Image (cartoon, rainbow, N blue to C red):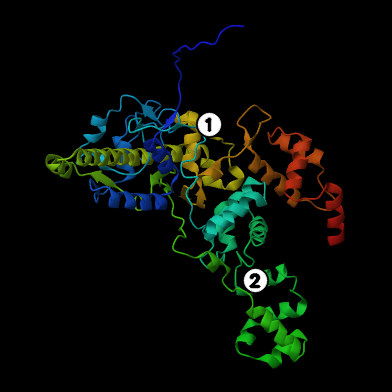
Amino acid sequence: MAGLMQKLDMRQGQSLVMTPQLQQAIKLLQLSNIELAEFVEGELERNPLLERDERETSTESLREEGEGEPRELELAAPSADAADSLDADGDAIHGDDSKSDLAGLDAGTGDAIGQGAGQWSASGGGGSSASEDYDAIANSSREVSLSEHLHAQLATATADPVDKLIGAHLIDLADDDGYMRADLDEVAAQLGVERGRIEKVLTLTQGFDPAGIMARDLTECLALQLTEKNRLDPAMAALLDNLDRLAKHDYAALKSICGVDNEDLDEMIAEIRDLTPKPGHAFTSDTTRAVEPDVFIRQSPDGAWQVELNTDTLPRVLVNNRYFNEISAVAKTEADKTFITECSQNASWLVKSLDQRARTILKVASEIVRQQDMFLAHGVAYLRPLNLRTVADAISMHESTVSRVTSNKYVATPRGMFELKYFFTSSIPSAGGGDAHSAEAVRYRIKSMIGQETVDDVLSDDKLVEYLRDEGIEIARRTVAKYREALNIPSSVQRRRILKRAG
């Protein structure tokens, strides 16, 4: 039996060390403008070397300062050589970013523009290895807002991405009381879909918790709550239709209209008084966050799409190097010197990362607009297939970076305000070898064709496949059946019976 022995081995390996600075970079990249402003406010209070930059900053200035980036706002192909390309997961650690380089930023230069997460130094202490899926803010806790509560339910309520996009738009239109008072015809025109599709998705969201949410008026809000309690009978419905008489205490007329006696009317009124006229107030608090666009998309007179950051909500900070020199000269103890140095490094990191965050968001948003320009011009039926890799490859970034940029970031477009992640869709191949079609657009086309059926011309799934292939969409019959079922559309046999009964 061989004896035990000890020996030393030297092995070389690579690992991603999640320093506090890198964790902060990832965190900043995920934050919305509103959340970022709150974070920067805290840093301004903690770091004496940071101060607010009151100078005017525009999207155009960000483009002009970037290497290889276009000066105009109109979309241009992003430079693959841009020195400010951020990969918060794979390329954010560079050994040549020395402490002296970071501490020596001039407060009067363009580096004082603050808007986003950028390249960070690996110096600054130890850390632990982590995968690219590390979520630096996963452990943070705060009260959930009404919008977040509804969006979370929408994510599991439907598998149809078009319905999700419509639902997200409707949720964002809801007010603090929980009502969705927007005109549905205007919403349909904005999104380029028929009103019936909007009404269908609105009905879906009205089934969310809390009961009564997403109603268009008080009567509908109370009716939704009574429906959940299984108490919306004809008499109660008649009472809800005459709330104005109830407000005037016209009980004699109400008894006649509802067909009830005094005792029944008293019970019905008591039930209504137990309902919540403003269901959204259960979520109203100081932590409720308003949805503000991070990016604006506008169409110029010549038809080009202009992409610009919402600089009104972007915090801008700079490093006060004059104050740094003053207090460094009078620092006596090692603890004081260490504190001043750390403040300088943290301030410089924050300034660089805010500027980098802005450029990264601008690049990602510009590429998404370039890919989805048909949606902006013609509506939701023209969504193109798009995934994270396509955008990441186009702008030379990592997929996980694009994923973080598109989460919690909203874009204001002529068709409404949407979260950037809603523009990513799956694809259906083209029969002619041309551009692929988005699954959402194919579902929309299937529903449109079925919506035009007559009792003498009901389309089978095979017929739908044939028509879609004539339009250049290569799709299998089972896929058509799956999409039809996902849209809650009955089979052709059932639809023919329905049309016959209706006729």
Q: Secondary structure at mark 2?
A: helix
* Residue appearing at x 75%, y 51% in the figure: 488
> Residue 387 at x, y = what percent?
56, 35
> Residue 14 at x, y = what percent?
45, 21
Please name the residue that numbered disc 1 is placed on. Answer: 390
Q: Residue furthest bottom?
A: 252
> Residue 496 at x, y = what percent?
85, 52
Q: Within 10 angstroms of label 2, few (less than 14), some, or many (20 or more) residues?
A: some
Q: Residue 82: name its quadrant.
A: top left
- Whether residue 438 appears in this view of the structure is yes
117, 39: nearer the viewer: 39
> Residue 308 at x, y = what percent?
38, 45
- Whether residue 192 appears in this view of the structure is no
Q: Is residue 52 above or below residue 66?
A: below
477, 399: nearer the viewer: 399
| Residue type beneath disc 2 | Glu
Please name the residue that numbered disc 2 is placed on. Answer: 220
